Image (cartoon, coloured by chain):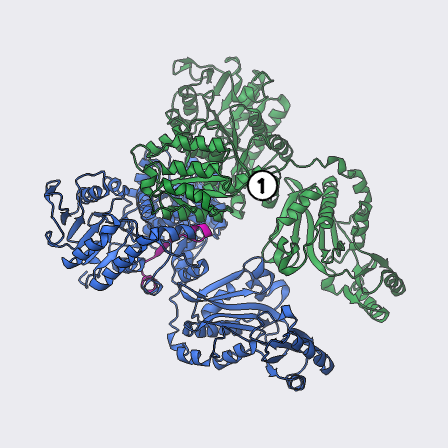
Chain colours: A blue, B green
């Protein structure tokens, strides 16, 4: 309040809206648009534009947008080929925002794609901000601006009262169908919404712009997104960084599968990004990400109705049905929660509240009779007030049409008083009557248990997300990186060159020398100390081992002479830089440290334990570069195989600090050198079990 | 029809029902029971029994059950302490079946548990079959016998028309609340039911008895179970074996978590079994098992509405929304399905059916306009008729109240004609009007996508379940096993004894001899051939390596003498059987083969690859013993790490036949010796990479 309105305010909260090509026929798209806008209760000025009509629904209809005197917002749903001219006229008439609903642009390919290029050019040239094309428009539920033909919107006008005190959810969706499906599902759960914005092909305005708006919007408490592909990663990152710690973002991300990517590519002419990069990016900014629409809805609902999220995972389950209690316990434990047995003291307090055939352990079975006599509420209050429990699940059957048999408002009050989350699950489907009674008391009724448990788990994980460290001051100079890389057309550096490059940026690899003759190799081995390894160095040999270009564990001069001949011969006449003589590293855990350059998000760090864990079990972890040593250590500890570092089978726990420092330093180089370096792979990096640090036993760098 | 009725027919389809302690007060449990039975439309004879009333609701009320002339079925919902006497009177009056709804028995513990013992004794003594106590009764929807007070049952009397042509589902649940919750949820999805039977504490009749009834019941097409713990594994196995290939069983199993087990233990006084054993048992009999109620419902619905289940996993997705298509593609691929790009030929056929901005690849985006003009149905027909696709998902928004815009019946006909499954997913929530229209056309509308995809995956896996081989003729004699085991109080056999035992039953381990002196060890090593291993053999040393009782890779006589002294000294004065001299096995993959004795299901085989795969990633697989060599090979191949056998990183593929033969033979011994052997662990078994077979390098047997 009082601060400068957001640049998109005039579009999303317009004082006037022109409907280009408006029609009195409500069976046509253009007619429906006008009809919904008027019927939706919009209090601003609606201006139909169509030379074929003098008036529509008793309102004057204008011959063109100039005659209409422009508008804050123009809605365009006319055939694609007529769109560029209409946009030009809007810009000339001073219109600052347009939503293009028409289809038949990039998603169709061929000549239609060039139409989209023309629309983009108009936005650049005129400064008019354009949303779409191929969009389903938006709905502003605060000011009742139905700038859409979605059939879900009229249904919301007569909606049941939303959950009392719940925060409003603002939706941005790249698919109109899915954006308004989320709205439809949310309304059925009595959730409340601020905006549903669909962004279509995003020729100008992208999801990032709308997220930026919703972060500041005081009517929006939770941001929900449906995303196929982020087109403007830098802007999205800026918006996400602003939201972190301030307003939760729930992300329904599709296009994870091969077919899903095809669908999104054809649908909005985007190429779905590499999924691991998306996941890493979302994790970094505490974005609650899921591929399941029900889990996304559950997360929005939980966040809208609960303000206090600790990171504790000890759940109490209170129920009148032992069977349902077991069902919910299993689901919560599958989602990573504990359902701890309660202390004898707490059980003693609980037992008098319900019949003797109930159970006080956890799940707490208050019995059907206990549920009717207040035991349900009493038990929830007792567990929430105790320090044994971080959150409560109230499990019930809410199928009956009759009034609730317990005081639901008291449940919500108890949760607020304890500063802990509570959620309500009905194992039967809820009747509208009881859903309404629960809503009045401030609670959402969940009926999809897996979605509810999964959403809670993700909310807690996101709630623990720290602000990313600002590593910009630590980045090396991009110019220095580009200059230090070997010149010419070389796309892959030899191990020797890669390590020389890394040493320039404070990454020490292994003790080694390049030898041009057997005598040089002998002298190198003497000074490094046996045992040593020999490796052929040639830009044309990418896989040294496969051609016999590697000899390991050479123990003395005689072995070295023989090995030198063999290794050199492996080049088979290809130009070789020489033979690398390397001191054999002591034994240890073999780790892979890599950096990929993702087309959307840029350099992404990958870590994993070598061998079977990576190859068979895909036990790898990703994080956007740059990454601090602390973040790198957390990333390494997130591996399943990290147990190997933690004193596995009686071994002493290992410090990960040297490895974390390496990962961080490599990530700084990758982030600064994103325009010149395509890929790093340090494999293996050996983490020595004796605490003597790490050795980079092999290194590959590909340049752009 | 015409065959002898099932023994439980008289209970579940009774000609007369007595309500013991019947009351005119419908707010009381006893009053509600009587009221529901009458109001439910039961055509048989209802006999209220209560000395305090002459008549109730205009029906004569009898002073006792004898005065009522007995009944096919007695319903008992009186205080627990009065139940045994009431049951005795029922038995005396010739009542053959009783359902005890009263609570306050084993689930309460203490003196109440002894009440349950008395009820069990009455069943045994009188031959009257008793269901419960602590049950919620049953509902026979065919004959409209509402022998329950569940509030979900009256709601079903005015239910909407069920899905046309769908098979009826018969439910058996150990939790009354959950059994009728499944009913409630199913009715909302327009599913049809034959029976909902809740079995409570199962003092006499168990889930197995009711499953046996439903397997034969002609009104039941799908069996759905809610299970906390199987009490009568042999009877359940017999019923499951009869159902396999004849009628699908969907199992909602709870008590998988620690807290879930506590809940079921306190709820129906059972101890939830070891979960891996349950899963293995369910897999063996093609039971579709899940811990999620929505997935169980989805599976019941898919099975009730589709008859043709191939094992093909190539899905076509047809939708008017590209975003929804991507959502469904991702979910299907997460569940193990393929969503293959269609051939250019098939795409050519599809394209004319929808506007140019649609997509023909798969997912097939027919666009909203195409959906209204028949393209949706046309596309489904085309893909189902092709041999590129095994099943179709019709994805739509069914939120509108208006009539369907496509011919739903045509969809179902196309699926039948192609002999392939079809399922319908609405990404918005379905309106009742459209759900009804789809039901009329024979389709269920799914709205929980993860549950639908997961259920399909499990149905396909179960559909591929072969009849288990009859291995009884191959079992060794139980007496021979007991006799061959070393006598006395020994609970753990030394490696030497374990392998001698195994050799008696055709399991060859490794080349080895027991030595009582260094000279004997030398002579053994000479004859076996170096290198050898030495291992102390003592019943009091379970972990030989930890005490220094193992020496590996001994290359010659001098090393052997020194090692012999060390190994012998490791016993530290404990009585030793001798020192085992073993030829060192050639290298290979280390495999664990174990057999546990599960309290519910008996011996369960476990296989896994040694080391990290088992310890960190729990990559193990289970199957009930006995297991055939073919089944054992399938089990081994189900491991994620089985890729190591299949030519991993350029290695030659390995034959698993010797390993499978070993697993099978050990399982036969374990099955025959279940009363004398507690546990086998062969670890490691080395599968040689050179194709020379296997070596059992260590073996442990614990006896009972």
Subunit that carries the residue with mark 1: B
The residue where tag 1 is placed is B271
Q: Quadrant of the N terminus of chain A?
A: bottom left
Quadrant hosting residue B10: top right
Q: Is residue A217 magenta?
A: no
Q: Quadrant of the C terminus of chain A?
A: bottom left
Q: How many marks?
A: 1
> Nearest the camera: B358 or A328?
B358
| Residue A30 rendering spot, x and y as whole percentages | 21, 44
Q: Does A440 appear above or below B104?
A: below
The segment highlighted magenta reads A239-260
Can residue A203 be seen by looking at this rendering?
A: no
> Nearest the camera: B432 or A461?
B432
| Residue A327 rendering spot, x and y as whole percentages | 48, 42
Q: Is residue B611 left or right of residue A704?
A: right
> Nearest the camera: A67 or A399?
A67
Q: At 41% from the left edge and 72% from the top edge, which residue is drawn? A: A675
């Amino acid at each position: 309040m009082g601060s400068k309105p957001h640049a998109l305010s005039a579009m999303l909260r317009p004082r006037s809206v022109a409907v280009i090509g408006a029609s009195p026929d409500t069976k046509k798209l253009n007619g429906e648009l006008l009809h919904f806008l008027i019927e939706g209760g919009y209090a601003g000025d609606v201006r139909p534009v169509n030379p074929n009509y003098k008036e529509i629904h008793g309102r004057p209809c204008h011959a063109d947008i100039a005659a209409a005197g422009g508008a804050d917002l123009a809605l365009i749903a006319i055939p694609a080929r007529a769109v560029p001219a209409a946009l030009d006229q809007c810009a000339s008439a001073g219109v600052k925002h347009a939503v293009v609903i028409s289809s038949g642009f990039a998603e169709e390919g061929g000549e239609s794609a060039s139409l989209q290029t023309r629309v983009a050019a108009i936005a650049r040239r005129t400064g008019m901000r354009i949303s779409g094309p191929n969009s389903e428009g938006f709905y502003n539920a605060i000011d009742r601006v139905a700038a859409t033909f979605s059939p879900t919107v009229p249904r919301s006008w007569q909606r049941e009262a939303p959950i009392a005190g719940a925060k409003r959810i603002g939706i941005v969706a790249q698919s109109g169908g899915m954006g308004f499906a989320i709205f439809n599902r949310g309304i059925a759960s009595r959730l409340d919404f601020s905006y549903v914005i669909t962004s279509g092909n995003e020729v100008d305005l992208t999801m990032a712009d709308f997220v930026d708006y919703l972060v500041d919007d005081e009517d929006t408490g939770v941001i929900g997104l449906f995303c196929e592909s982020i087109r403007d990663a830098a802007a999205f990152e800026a918006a996400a960084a602003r939201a972190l710690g301030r307003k939760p973002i729930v992300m329904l991300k599709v296009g994870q599968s091969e077919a899903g990517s095809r669908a999104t590519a054809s649908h909005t002419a985007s190429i779905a990004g590499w999924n691991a990069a998306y996941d890493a990016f979302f994790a970094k900014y505490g974005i609650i990400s899921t591929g399941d629409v029900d889990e996304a809805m559950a997360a929005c609902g939980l966040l809208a109705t609960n303000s206090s999220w600790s990171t504790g995972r000890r759940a109490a389950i209170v129920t009148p049905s032992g069977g349902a209690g077991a069902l919910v316990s299993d689901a919560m434990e599958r989602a990573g929660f504990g359902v701890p047995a309660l202390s004898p003291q707490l059980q003693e307090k609980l037992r008098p509240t319900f019949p003797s055939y109930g159970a006080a352990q956890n799940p707490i079975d208050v019995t059907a009779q206990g549920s009717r006599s207040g035991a349900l509420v009493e038990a929830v209050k007792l567990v929430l007030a105790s320090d044994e429990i971080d959150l409560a699940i109230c499990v019930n059957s809410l199928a009956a049409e009759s009034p609730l048999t317990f005081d639901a408002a008291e449940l919500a009050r108890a949760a607020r008083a304890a500063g802990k989350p509570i959620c309500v699950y009905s194992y039967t489907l809820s009747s509208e009557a009881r859903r309404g009674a629960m809503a009045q008391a401030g609670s959402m009724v969940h009926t999809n248990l897996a979605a509810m448990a999964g959403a809670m788990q993700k909310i807690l994980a996101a709630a623990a997300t720290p602000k990313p460290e600002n590593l910009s001051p630590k980045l090396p100079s991009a110019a220095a990186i580009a200059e230090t890389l070997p010149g010419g057309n070389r796309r892959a550096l030899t191990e020797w060159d890669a390590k020389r490059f890394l040493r320039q940026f404070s990454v020490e690899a292994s003790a080694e020398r390049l030898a041009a003759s057997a005598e040089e190799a002998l002298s190198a081995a003497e000074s490094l100390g046996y045992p040593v390894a020999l490796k052929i160095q040639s830009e044309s040999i990418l896989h040294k081992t496969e051609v016999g270009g590697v000899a390991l564990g050479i123990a003395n001069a005689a072995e070295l002479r023989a090995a030198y001949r063999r290794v050199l011969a492996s080049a088979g006449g290809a130009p070789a830089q020489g033979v690398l003589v390397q001191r054999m590293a002591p034994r240890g855990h073999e780790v892979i440290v890599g950096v990929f350059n993702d087309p959307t998000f840029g350099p992404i760090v990958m870590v994993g334990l070598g061998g079977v864990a990576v190859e068979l079990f895909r036990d790898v972890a990703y994080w956007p570069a740059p990454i601090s040593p602390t973040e790198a250590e957390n990333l390494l500890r997130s591996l399943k195989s990290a147990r190997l570092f933690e004193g596995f089978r009686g071994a002493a726990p290992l410090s990960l600090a040297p490895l974390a420092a390496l990962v961080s330093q490599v990530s700084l180089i990758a982030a600064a050198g994103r325009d010149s370096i395509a890929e790093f792979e340090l494999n293996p990096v050996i983490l020595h079990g004796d605490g003597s640090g790490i050795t980079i036993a092999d290194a590959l760098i590909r340049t752009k």
